[in-house]
Image (cartoon, helix red, strand yellow):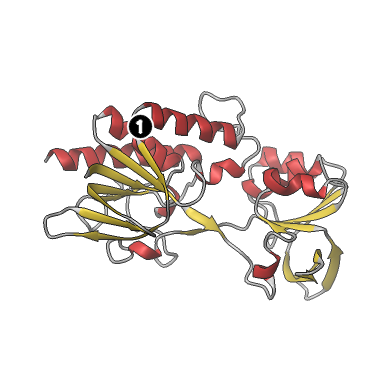
Amino acid sequence: MYDIIIVGGGPAGLTAAVYARRANRSVLVIEKDSFGGQITFSPNVENIPGFEAVSGNEFAEKLVGQALAQGADMESAEVTGIVRGENGVFTVLTDGDAWLSRSVILASGAKHRTLGLEGEEELIGNGISFCAVCDGAFYRGRQVAVVGGGNSALQETLLLADLCEKVTVIQNLPFLTGEKKLADAVTAKPNVEVITSAVVDAYLGTPDTGVTGVRIKKDGGELIELPAAAVFLAVGLVPQNEAFADLVALDERGYADSGENCLTKTPGLFVAGDCRAKRIRQVTTAAADGAVAALAACDYLGE
């Protein structure tokens, strides 16, 4: 039995693991995808204290290494449910195993939001991508589109602009919502076109041909077809909390309805990171949540 099981191996979960191990608590981190979380998709991060610039992959590797060096156990699996027994012991269920723990920290994060258009699922991985650093090189010298106007979309655009013949940014609002420094860098690129007040209406192409372009709809109703060998989606995230809804109160968007103390309605269960309802979602706030949740769990175990 572990003192603390952490569901999710992103910055929040890994920070929680470091703090819990430094408090001499036994820790297991369970991650269904890749350890490091969403930060691994960022080619260049410049807002983490202590790093003038660092790639998301490098930062994630350092976090994983730090947690392992402190003695945390790690398991690659998907958590399908959590049950709290009458004795207060949690059973964390994965596809093939059941793990026991005296407390649990949910740092389950969020997954990429899609547009919900016809044929989208079939084109994911065949022209639709969520990661320029992963897939951008496949479209070197070609025309691509980026959907979104926040920091993630702008970072993707800057990377793609150095690889591709042309990058078209499609933003549903009248302006880019990312940091001004990023927005200025994007608009300064000669091979980047920014189209605002427009939404993607349809994907062009088939599963056989892959993506060949997009059809966009402008605010006035005008439809325009744009050629694109790939579409990179950066339109937000969906929290991964459905499997835990019986133990954690969720808000209308599915985020854990917990404050800065990271507590939930279930004693011994805490939340941290992007799965929690909050105004600011940055790697620094995720790490802060991880520290708070770990210390709260340690206090709970000491009671």
- Residue 159 to residue 243: above or below: above
Residue drawn 27% across the image and 62% down it = 247
Residue drawn 14% across the image and 38% down it = 302
- Residue 144 to residue 140: above or below: below
Does residue 149 appear to the left or right of 187 in the view shown?
Answer: left
Instruction: Please state the horizontal and vertical placement of residue 83, each as a whole percent of the image.
Output: 24, 61
The one of 226 and 164 positioned closer to us in this rendering:
164
Residue drawn 33% across the image and 65% down it = 245
Element class at badge 1: helix
- Give the position of the N terminus as an image quadrant: top left
As shown in the figure, which amino acid type bears the numbered disc 1? Answer: Val
- Residue 141 to residue 114: above or below: above
Instruction: Please state the horizontal and vertical placement of residue 156, each as a whole percent of the image.
Output: 70, 46
Instruction: Please state the horizontal and vertical placement of residue 76, each as a whole percent of the image.
Output: 44, 48
Does residue 40 appear to the left or right of 271 in the view shown?
Answer: right
Instruction: Please state the horizontal and vertical placement of residue 93, each as a whole percent of the image.
Output: 32, 58
